[in-house]
């Protein structure tokens, strides 16, 4: 708006037809704003920001707690094909949870510090043994910090 105003003051050149041109310019300005409002109105409801993973119900939940030097997984058996909410916490220092699929491919990683719960949702599409490893150095036995969970049909 400031830029718009600044283009309208100062340069007063009087030429024939000026009033008419200014009027036309005004109409174009209104047309552009109206167009943008219509586009905004037509698309804003398709933005999925309000569809958070935290919203609504998720059929299964697993609690994962890290502490020097192990992950506690509760429950350790999960069903395939269901939206699964992970609630990850730390009982002591900062840890980094990595979830590995049965082929040992990292499918999710999240850092977790004491006092802060990290949530995310995974839908497992393959049965098998998934590994949980720590991906943030948290002490002398950081490399031993590992657990697993079974995903079944
Ligand atoms: Cu926990 Cu590294």
Image (cartoon, helix red, strand yellow):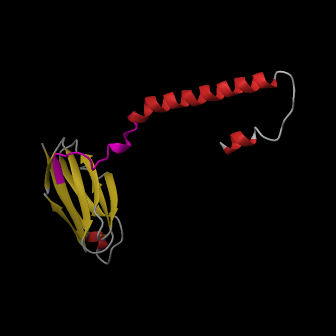
Furthest toward the bottom, the residue is 140
Task: Identify the image quadrant of the C terminus.
Answer: top left
Please provide percent x and percent y for residue 122.
26, 47
Please give the name of the residue rendered at 23% of the width and 55% of the height, measured from the top-left corner: 86
User: Does residue 66 show up magenta in the picture?
Assistant: no
Please provide percent x and percent y for residue 133.
28, 62
Please give the name of the residue rendered at 30% of the width and 71% of the height, measured from the top-left corner: 114
- The residue closer to the viewer here, 79 or 20, is 20
Task: Identify the image quadrant of the N terminus.
Answer: top right
Asked whether, in this view, residue 104 is left or right of residue 37, the answer is left
Please give the name of the residue rendered at 48% of the width and 33% of the height, measured from the top-left corner: 40
Please provide percent x and percent y for residue 13.
86, 32
Residue range corresponding to the magenta coloring: 46-61
Q: Quadrant of residue 64?
A: bottom left
- The residue closer to the viewer here, 5 or 64, is 5
How many marks are shown on the rendered structure? 0
Q: Quadrant of residue 142?
A: bottom left
Please give the name of the residue rendered at 71% of the width and 41% of the height, measured from the top-left corner: 5
Asked whether, in this view, residue 18 is left or right of residue 5, the answer is right
Q: Quadrant of residue 90?
A: bottom left
- The residue closer to the viewer here, 41 or 149, is 41
Please provide percent x and percent y for residue 96.
33, 64
User: Does residue 57 show up magenta in the picture?
Assistant: yes
Asked whether, in this view, residue 62 is left or right of residue 119, the answer is left
- Compared to residue 115, the image places residue 42 above or below, namely above
- Compared to residue 147, the image places residue 52 above or below, namely above
């Amino acid at each position: 708006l400031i830029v718009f105003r600044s283009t309208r003051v100062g340069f007063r050149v009087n030429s024939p037809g000026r009033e008419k041109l200014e009027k036309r310019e005004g109409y174009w300005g209104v047309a552009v704003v109206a167009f943008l409002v219509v586009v905004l109105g037509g698309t804003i409801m398709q933005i999925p920001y309000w569809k958070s993973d935290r919203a609504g119900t998720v059929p299964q939940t697993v609690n994962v707690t890290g502490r020097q030097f192990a992950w506690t997984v509760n429950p350790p058996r999960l069903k395939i094909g269901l939206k699964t909410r992970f609630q990850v916490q730390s009982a002591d220092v900062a840890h980094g949870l990595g979830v590995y699929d049965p082929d040992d491919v990292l499918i999710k990683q999240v850092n977790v510090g004491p006092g802060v719960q990290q949530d995310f949702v995974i839908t497992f599409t393959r049965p098998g043994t998934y590994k949980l490893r720590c991906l943030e150095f948290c002490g002398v036995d950081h490399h031993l910090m590992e657990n697993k969970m079974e995903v079944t049909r």
